[in-house]
Amino acid sequence: MELILPARRGLGWHNAKMLSRLMVLGAALLFSTGGAAIKAVSLTGWQTAGLRSGVAGVALLLLVREARRGWKWQVAPAGVLYAATLVLFVHANKLTTSANAIFLQSTAPAYLILIGPLLLKEKLKSRDLWFALALAAGMGLFFTGVENPLATAPEPARGNVYAALSGLTYALTLASLRWMAHGRGEESGALATVTAGNLLAFLICLPQALPLGHVTGVDAGVVLYLGFVQIGLAYWLLTHGMKHVPAFEASTLLLLEPVANPVFTWLFHGEQPSGRALAGGAVIVASTLVKVWGERRSG
């Protein structure tokens, strides 16, 4: 779950391009470990979400210089929406399979296609409607039939709802970033929003997270990994990689996240998503890939 940052060209463009691609891929790979890592923590959803975001907020301020820039009042509402996305995503991973959580969150562009014309007065194109319908079809596969509970996914139906809601709040976050940048000729404040969202998520979760009770060494280690590495280091890689990688190419490389996410969970937890979930995820990822490259060709 990442916010695309604006690409910038600098010195050594051609020489740095391959390294930049590897950095974006590295970010996607780190993002994709979130589901498996969240499931490895024995704490509650509120505790996991709060501690993960608290560590991440500090990590972003320390590791990513750009996270300390672009703070303005418009970051507050965007940060609240992103905080909701973070909390919903963690709860979804605690209740349903990580494949369901990441694929359903990846339907955010479908909501954004509808939100853009309504709130931002953006022009709706016919190909956008086809894309939204394809994503809706993929999403629908997650809500057909009955999924059997698993040790790592005890309440799949409720978790699927949380995951779908995280897609909606993520779309609203992206719409907020467009609103901040619209007509101002400036960057959208994406990293400030990510940082604010994590700090707000920590504060929102804190009342429900206390008292912590017994925290094992494994829990502490995984939470630190989630905050400093899975979010902090990943955004550092993404920030530097995006300097030499066009946005369309970065969007393609970042599709590694939803593809690799269930693989990591299967490797570490033996969690196997249903056939419907895999089919729905394939529709969502393939539709997104077609959309990204279609926009590139149309200029």
Image (tube, grey):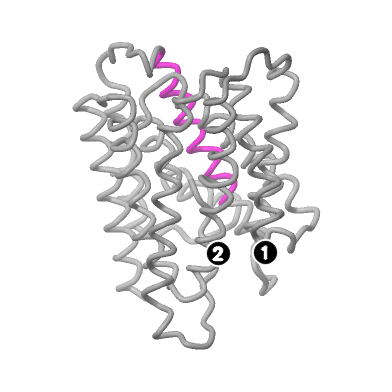
Which residue in the structure is indicated by mark 1? 66
Q: Does the magenta-highlighted stretch encompass residue 97?
A: no
Type of the residue with mark 2: Thr
Please name the residue shown 60% across and 56% down the image. Answer: 120
Secondary structure under badge 1?
helix
Disc 2 and disc 1 in contact, CB within 8 angstroms:
yes
Q: Does the magenta-highlighted stretch encompass residue 159?
A: yes
Image coords of residue 227 (percent x, y):
59, 41
Q: Residue furthest front?
A: 217
Front residue of 283 and 209:
209
The part of the image, by quadrant, that contains residue 13 is bottom left
Which residue in the structure is indicated by mark 2? 239
What secondary structure prevails in the magenta region? helix
Seen in the picture, residue 55 relative to 288 is either above or below; the reply is above
Image coords of residue 169 (percent x, y):
56, 38
Image coords of residue 223 (percent x, y):
57, 33
Type of the residue with mark 1: Glu
User: What residue span does the magenta drawing correspond to?
Assistant: 155-174
